[in-house]
Amino acid sequence: MGAIVSPSYEDVTSRYEPVVGLETHVELGTNTKMFCACPTGFGAAPNTQICPVCLGLPGSLPVANAAAIEATIRIGLALNCTIASWCRFARKNYFYPDMPKNYQISQYDEPLCGEGWLDIDLDGETVRIGIERVHLEEDTGKTLHVGGATGRIHGASESLVDYNRAGIPLVEIVTKPIPGTGARAPQVARAYVTELRDVVRSLGVSDVRMEQGSMRCDVNTSLNLPGAAWGTRTETKNVNSLRSVERAVRSEMVRQAGLLDAGVPIHQETRHFHEDTGDTTPGRSKETATDYRYFPEPDLVPLAPDAAWVAELKDALPELPRVHRQRLQAAWELSDAEMAAVLNAGAVELIEQTVAAGATAAGARKWWLGDLARRANEQGVELAAVGVTPAHVAALQALVDEGRLNDKLARVVLEGVVAGEGDPAAVMSARGLAVVSDTGALTAAVDAAIEANPDVAAKVRDGKVAAAGALVGAVMKTTGGQADARTVRELIIARLS
């Protein structure tokens, strides 16, 4: 076998068709675990939130968490699913060191919610993502690999297990296969997980913090030639950021294309995504359902949600994010293309919070989609992580609106805010960046500009007022951009009229 050559992404999408599927796990924000009364708070000392039930000790019996069942039904309703009138839990049998029971209480062929959809907006187009199932299970513990450079088992000197997370209610949301998206497959995957996160957050059932593991995504990817049967899929496990979801799909498409071009078959397996390189590496061969030896959980009674109760839950759903965004688009008077830019930048909530803090929609959008979006791209982080809050942006725009800063100075102030020098007013004061609008202070600079540019001054005297722009620019340069341009222009015209 010759060396595997990775083709360009453009080459991959010109010859192959991708199919993507997403399995998203959401930890519910209940006070107690799924089948016991242990607390669920994040960040507790290892192995301090455990009991015989979540450790699976002999003689312990589970009791289902009613709040978790309600939250799962609400998620299913928000995703347009049919809610089962009768379903039950099942045991999923497999061994992992972080799973104390050696089985996981989950759901198999009878999920609580199924056959739904979620619409996403991408580049002005609506894409409907089919939802196969939404089921409820318990989370596993967490294995910590220490002594190595990567935090993974390879190279680690020892592994430790924290069972605090074991037994926390976990909702798994599984899409149907998503074909037909072509080169946009990575963007579609990211847009779906983004929308799903927003939906779950709007319901108030989880904080969906991917960086803390309360929302994790398994990304399934396969390639096939146009018109051929779908290819063998791989499953990239536990992807923990929106950006990484997109990168994982793209990376797998390029990797698989290189193998297929070389005549090497794709193996159905799990893979690990590496944030530093954007690559995936093999995990284990992927089991099938029969490998898990599912059977009905003998210690739990079936679930039979009352239809009237489900209807009440549906009627009480909050305004869902897509409807909310459509309302905001109308209020902000944005075109579809402008709203798409806001969505692509992940700025809807940030702009909304900035407007709530006192800025206009136009002012908020200018900063979040301009300088701040550029910084986020350069740093490779989400927009909300650039070090500036909506309150900062609203305060910055207020200084501009009041005439105390111009846009050029405001950008310098913004740099100070990002650097941790304080809020915009404090940075402006400390750096002495306020706009100079005092006519007495500007007169000397105006006179100097007129004297240095006699030809331009003559044009203005002859009635060509537009020529005054060159003189304004000269004054701005002399004052380091701190002069108020409107005041300077008025002084120039008054001098030369």
Image (spheres, rainbow, N blue to C red):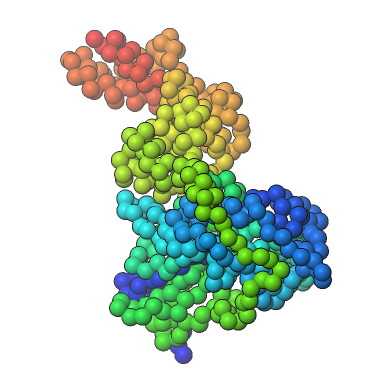
For residue 402, what is the image quadrant?
A: top left
When asked about the image quadrant of residue 271, the answer is bottom right
Image-quadrant location for residue 100: bottom right
Q: Residue at x 74, y 71 (%)?
A: 101
- Say which residue appears at 42% left-offset and 58% top-offset: 117
- The residue furthest bottom is 1
Of 313 and 375, nearer the camera is 313
Residue at 35% from the left image edge and 24% from the top image edge = 474
- In the picture, the quarter occupied by the C terminus is top left
Rendered position, 27 above or below 95: above
Horizontal side of 40 relative to 115 (left or right) equals right
Can you give x and y, in whole percent of width and height, for residue 94 in the image? 67, 77
Q: Position of residue 28 (x, y in %)?
A: 62, 53
Q: Is residue 457 left or right of residue 25?
A: left
Give whichever of 378, 220 is nearer the camera.
220
The spot of residue 54 in percent (x, y) is 75, 63
Residue 394 in sight from this viewpoint: no
Side of 408 relative to 52 (left or right): left
